[in-house]
């Protein structure tokens, strides 16, 4: 047996600094996905301090660490009031949007034990966390196409998809990929008429949209004020600008939450009592979220939301004047979704933006929805609004000069011939080599510029895309030798 040698704190810091040199920046507003930056140094500092000081506490047993229970109840209360939760609402703090969604689907499924083959109805724009929930929990997803222009869920089609096996109907406020709020009123009404739960995924919008209401009275209704909404998820580690690892799942009543609570007394150890997927869980993220939420406070959240929203809207008007680029949907929140005409492609623009120091996220085509660029605006991005606009114009001009990335036809043919169900190591290795992604020892080598690889993946059916990308992850996630 060999264990690693002991390193001094200085050595540890130097090593981690070197590792982080390859990471995207978390602050400064140049990373327009994955991270959220309020630009408030003091809020970040108190979050980090409290995260560290509560890191060893354990949310496993609320009676052992009553401080955690008190903070959880407080945050659930704050969140519920933000989204018009009715009297008697309940909620839990989870580790993130995906966990909140998994629990919402579990609660809906187990709330209808008489349905032996449960289904959930969701627009094609619903977050992929619902696909994971469907897969893990064996709930069949019924995908409903969205309006091709607004990219909002289609209420009639959603209603028509509900049947006696439906246990949950899903809507977004807003959707991640296009940043639009679904028409929650008619969809929740249809769900309610059928006696089915309706979940609003406000993971990304839940802490920003309520703060925009005063200035945007025309915002589509999406909270518990809408009749028929039974649960709602909102992430604090997004627009509440807390350290990562905190989301809230709210239910309209204690009864609706009951079916994702878990107890087991069927062993000789402690009775396991869990409200969430995790059992032992650090109190650090919850306590840090409590600290940041109360440090920033309601008025400053309004300012932060308006700042991010104005930056998103400002760029959306600039986009109209950039040849080759257009909005994929009119933004309802702080997210932009951009698409191109056939003079260029989003993957090359993304590479060109990275060269200019910006991370904007390429999103591949799905059914009739074109490939897009996703931009999440944080308050901190607003300070560089002009720069991002001019760099986006330059990046798009460069992408037009290069022409659309088109993968070699032989490569597409080779990849398209692969059956995702039977892909083996040798075939995958051959494809990597043909795509120029294999080093001398056959190990995966990712290129600096991803446009060619992304364009190839974009040209393939989703099932194959998934299997190939899992192959990549599988090769990346290997123990160091
Ligand atoms: C609308 C929406 N739902 C769910 C999620 C998943 O959240 P998480 O990545 O915290 O699991 C996201 C993440 O961006 C999101 O935007």
Image (cartoon, grey):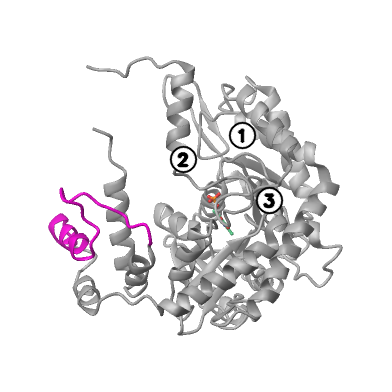
Q: CA distance from mark 1 to mark 3?
A: 15 Å
* Image spot of residue 116 (x, y percent): 43, 60
Q: Is residue 77 magenta?
A: no
Q: Which residue is mark 1?
A: 285
Q: CA distance from mark 2 to mark 1?
A: 25 Å
Q: Nearer the viewer, mark 1 or mark 3?
A: 3
Quadrant where the C terminus sits is top left
Q: Is residue 430 magenta?
A: yes
Q: Please name the residue shown 62% across and 19% down the image.
A: 64
Q: Which mark is residue 276?
A: none
Give the mark nearer the N terminus: 2 vs 1: 2
Q: Report helix, strand or loop for mark 3.
A: loop
Q: Which mark is residue 239?
A: 3
* Image spot of residue 338 (x, y percent): 57, 73
CB within 8 Å, label 2 to label 1: no
Given residues 126 and 432, the one toward you in this image is 432
The residues colored magenta run 423-449
Q: Which mark is residue 21?
A: 2
Q: Give the quadrant of residue 431.
A: bottom left
CB within 8 Å, label 3 to label 2: no
Give the mark nearer the N terminus: 3 vs 2: 2
Ligand 1 within 8 Å of disc 2? The answer is: no
Label 2, residues with CA under 10 Å away: few <14, some 14-19, many ≥20: few
Q: Report helix, strand or loop for mark 1.
A: helix
Q: Is residue 247 above or below residue 308?
A: above
Given residues 266 and 450, the one toward you in this image is 450
* Image spot of residue 258 (x, y percent): 61, 44
Given residues 189 and 314, the one toward you in this image is 314
Q: Please name the residue shown 65% across and 71% down the image.
A: 182
Label 1, residues with CA under 10 Å away: few <14, some 14-19, many ≥20: many
């Amino acid at each position: 047996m060999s264990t690693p040698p002991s390193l001094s704190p200085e050595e540890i810091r130097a090593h981690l600094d070197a590792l982080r040199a390859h990471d995207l920046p978390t602050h400064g507003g140049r990373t327009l996905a994955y991270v959220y930056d309020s630009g408030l140094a003091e809020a970040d500092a108190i979050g980090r301090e409290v995260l560290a000081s509560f890191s060893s506490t354990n949310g496993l047993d609320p009676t052992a660490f009553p401080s955690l229970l008190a903070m959880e109840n407080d945050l659930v209360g704050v969140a519920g009031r933000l989204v018009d939760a009715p009297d008697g609402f309940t909620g839990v703090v989870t580790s993130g949007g995906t966990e909140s969604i998994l629990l919402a689907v579990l609660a809906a499924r187990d709330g209808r034990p008489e349905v032996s083959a449960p289904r959930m109805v969701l627009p094609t724009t619903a977050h992929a966390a619902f696909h994971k929930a469907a897969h893990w929990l064996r709930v069949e997803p019924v995908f409903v196409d969205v309006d091709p222009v607004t990219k909002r869920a289609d209420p009639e089609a959603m209603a028509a998809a509900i049947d006696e096996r439906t246990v949950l109907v899903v809507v977004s406020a807003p959707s991640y990929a296009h940043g639009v709020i679904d028409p929650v009123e008619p969809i929740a009404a249809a769900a309610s008429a059928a006696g089915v739960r309706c979940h609003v995924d406000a993971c990304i919008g839940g802490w920003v949209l309520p703060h925009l209401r005063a200035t945007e009275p025309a915002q589509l209704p999406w909270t518990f004020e809408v009749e028929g909404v039974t649960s709602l998820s909102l992430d604090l580690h997004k627009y509440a600008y807390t350290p990562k690892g905190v989301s809230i799942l709210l239910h309209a009543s204690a009864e609706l939450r009951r079916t994702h609570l878990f107890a087991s007394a069927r062993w000789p150890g402690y009775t396991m009592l869990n409200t969430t997927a995790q059992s032992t869980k650090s109190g650090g993220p919850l306590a840090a979220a409590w600290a940041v939420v109360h440090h920033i406070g309601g008025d400053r959240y309004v300012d932060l939301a308006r700042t991010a929203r104005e930056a998103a809207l400002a760029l959306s008007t600039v986009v109209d004047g950039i040849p080759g680029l257009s909005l994929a949907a009119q933004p309802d929140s702080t997210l932009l979704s951009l698409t191109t005409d056939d003079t260029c492609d989003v993957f090359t623009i993304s590479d060109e933006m990275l060269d200019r120091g910006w991370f904007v996220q390429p999103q591949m085509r799905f059914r009739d929805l074109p490939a897009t660029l996703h931009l999440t605006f944080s308050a901190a991005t607003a300070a560089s609004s002009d720069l991002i606009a001019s760099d986006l114009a330059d990046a798009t001009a460069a992408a037009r000069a290069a022409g659309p990335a088109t993968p070699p036809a032989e490569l597409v043919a080779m990849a398209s011939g692969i059956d995702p169900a039977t892909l083996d190591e040798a075939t995958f290795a051959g494809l990597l080599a043909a795509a120029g992604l294999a080093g001398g020892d056959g190990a995966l080598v990712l290129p600096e510029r991803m446009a060619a690889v992304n364009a190839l993946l974009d040209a393939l059916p989703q099932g194959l895309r998934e299997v190939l990308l899992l192959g990549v992850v599988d090769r990346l996630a290997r123990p160091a030798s």
